[in-house]
Amino acid sequence: MFIELHGDAVKEKIEEYIIRSVEEYKGRGIVPKLAVIRAGEDSGQQYYENAILKQSAAYGIETQAINFTSNISQALIDVTLQAVNEDEGIHGIIMLRPLPASIDGEKLRTMLNPAKDVDAITDISIAELFTGKEDAFFACTAEACMEVMHHYGIDPSGRRVTIVGRSLTVGKPLAIMMLNEDATITVCHSKTPKEDQIKACRDADIVVLATGMTQGYGTEYFRDGQIILDVGTGTGRDGKMHGDLDIDEIKEKGEITDLTYTPVPGGIGRVTTALLLRNIIKAARR
């Protein structure tokens, strides 16, 4: 049996809080506002940005989309980030990653105003994750994975969890979050040999795919009875949006018949965007 863990029910609970909070702030003359910075034409980033803009408008949150071509200069993006940092009308900032290879993303990360760091990539946000500070900013995609598991009654305690991907926005913070809930963690990445990655995935009870390799993980990586949290977004072979999980190949091959997974679209991404906007409320309060 294939079971899909949809994000809509999780998102609805978060939405209720956001809507109440936006109304409260507007009553005080404050309109929560988010700046979205994107460089390049990555399809997954464009999909995420569009989702942010659409949901923000629905909740009454203002957004400013700042888009650059992939050949943007370091100097221009530096100046742009500094201006947004200093703009008192903007409460939160998200820089869609990865940035073009020519851009020093580490420099931008350290430049970002921690009080506006709604995607939790600054040193202060990372430290607050490690120390478990209440009401801190947490990496939205990583937190979305936890929210989905909690909603569906999936307890990571004592379970083997393999995370494929070690980014600052997903793999690394999610490993800490899972560890904080007593899971046993394995993290794979681009330098992990394929045979080791396959073994780590097949041995796990819960697998998180966060690589951006659209439809890159099929039957050979999995076994019956697993839970797959698919974080990836990209354009698949059919020209439609898909995740890292190649669920079409798995169903067609027929070797696996019992799998629980988050669909793309409609899974982790739905919750991620809602959590990002919830962080805007936290930022406005700060």
Image: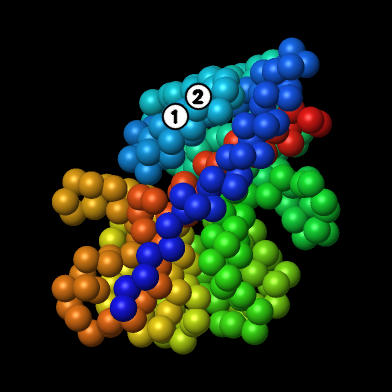
Left or right of 66: which side holds 278? Answer: right
What residue would you read off at disc 2? 57
Quarter holding residue 50: top left
Circles 2 and 1: CB distance less than 8 Å?
yes
Q: Residues within 10 Å of mark 1 (few under 14, many from 20)?
A: some
Quarter holding residue 181: bottom right
Residue in view at x 35 percent, y 54 percent: 264
From the top left corner, tell me how far across and down residue 10 is, in percent. 54, 53
Q: Nearer the viewer, residue 266 or 117?
A: 266
What residue would you read off at disc 1? 54
Mark 1 element type: helix
- Relative to 113, residue 134 above or below: below
Q: Amino acid at mark 2?
A: Ala
Residue in view at x 77 percent, y 47 percent: 136
Inspect this view and state whether residue 11 appears. yes
Residue in view at x 35 percent, y 34 percent: 41
